[in-house]
């Protein structure tokens, strides 16, 4: 039996490959585990991202009980419990930084659909509070919303899984798993079931309508803000890369379901991110 031995790599080539890897993966000299280890600037940026995230965890509480079967009622319950746990995790981190998070939680919970933080939530909740929609349409809006937006929320958390502030990195890993996979996979299954039930046209229309709002969720490809987040180590992946990772995932699934993406899938209402 002959052993498989890799070709020897010259020291120069190894160094060049290492340099390339270092450009792609940010390495931080130290990790922080306690709030008092953070600089004032770091705390301010971290509080900013935590507060935005906290509001989004409490954005979808106006949902009408429209799940079509006991299985799906349980599934909705599992998702809402997950969101509550995400919210409580953020509450803990904010409190540890000396911030009272409750005014933010209350603001998010009582805000009218028109005052939602992100356009995409406003759009989806509109479907769900308008009396015009049928029960099937309401449920499909839940499905498409989860598929595109929970998947997007999960991928945004991927940007912070490598953070050098470990409580925030751990929170982000959980959110990536829950939103980027569990919640969004069931959203895709709702769309799939609706197609099988003969609602392909509605699924496609809602998908096309919600899509540009979902694309906008990730923010600008580049900005001084996102660069500073990355320099500090609060996020380790940029908005452009996160949006492209989300697109690759959703594109493959849309193909599987026979749902068409817009001609320019990187165009939102707030900007064209294909540049
Ligand atoms: Fe969440
Ligand atoms: Fe969520």
Image: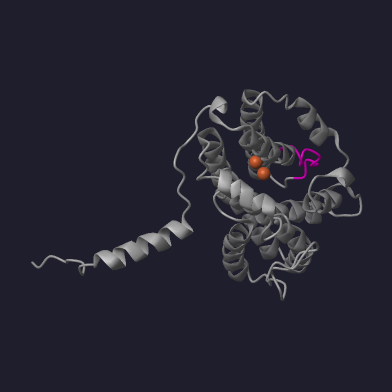
The question of residue 253 being in magenta is answered with: no
As drawn, 156 above or below 221: above
Residue farthest to the left, as pictured: 1
* Residue 206 percent location from the top left of the image: 78, 62
Quarter of the image with the N terminus in it: bottom left
Which residue is at a point 17% across and 66% down the rendered structure image?
Answer: 5
The percent coordinates of residue 37 (x first, y second) are 53, 28
Q: Quadrant of residue 35?
A: top right
The segment highlighted magenta reads 57-66
Q: Nearer the viewer, residue 73 or 204?
A: 204
Q: Quadrant of residue 220?
A: bottom right
Residue 246 screen position, x and y as percent:
60, 59
Q: Residue at x 82, y 54 (%)?
A: 123
Tell which of 23 and 105 is nearer to you: 23
Image quarter in which the C terminus is found? bottom right
Q: Quadrant of ligand 1?
A: top right
Q: Is residue 183 visible?
A: no
For this rendering, which residue is in front, 177 or 233? 233
Quadrant housing residue 77: top right
- On screen, residue 11 versus residue 67, left or right, reads left
Could you say which is closer to the camera, residue 41 or residue 5?
41
Residue 274 seen by the camera: yes
Q: Position of 156 compared to 267: left or right?
A: left
Total number of numbered labels?
0
Q: Position of residue 193 (x, y in %)?
A: 66, 59
């Amino acid at each position: 039996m002959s052993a498989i031995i890799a070709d020897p790599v010259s020291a120069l080539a190894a160094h060049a490959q290492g340099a390339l890897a270092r450009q792609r993966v940010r390495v931080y000299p130290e990790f922080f585990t306690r709030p008092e280890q953070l600089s004032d600037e770091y705390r301010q940026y971290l509080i900013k991202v935590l507060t935005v995230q906290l509001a989004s965890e409490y954005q979808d509480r106006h949902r009408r009980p429209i799940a079509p079967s006991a299985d799906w009622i349980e599934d909705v319950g599992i998702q809402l419990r997950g969101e509550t746990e995400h919210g409580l995790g953020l509450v803990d981190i904010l409190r540890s930084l000396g911030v009272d998070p409750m005014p933010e939680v209350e603001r998010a919970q009582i805000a009218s659909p028109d005052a939602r933080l992100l356009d995409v939530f406003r759009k989806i909740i509109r479907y769900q509070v308008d009396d015009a929609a049928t029960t099937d349409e309401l449920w499909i809006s839940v499905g498409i919303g989860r598929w595109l937006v929970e998947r997007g929320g999960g991928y945004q958390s991927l940007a912070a899984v490598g953070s050098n502030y470990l409580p925030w990195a751990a929170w982000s890993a959980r959110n990536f798993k829950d939103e980027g996979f569990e919640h969004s996979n069931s959203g895709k299954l709702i769309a799939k079931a609706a197609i099988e039930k003969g609602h392909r046209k509605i699924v496609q229309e809602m998908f096309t309508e919600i899509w540009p709002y979902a694309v906008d969720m990730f923010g600008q490809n580049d900005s001084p803000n996102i660069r500073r987040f990355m320099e500090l180590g609060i996020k380790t992946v940029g908005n452009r890369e996160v949006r492209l990772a989300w697109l690759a995932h959703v594109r493959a699934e849309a193909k599987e379901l026979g749902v068409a993406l817009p001609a320019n899938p990187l165009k939102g209402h707030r900007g064209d991110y294909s540049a």
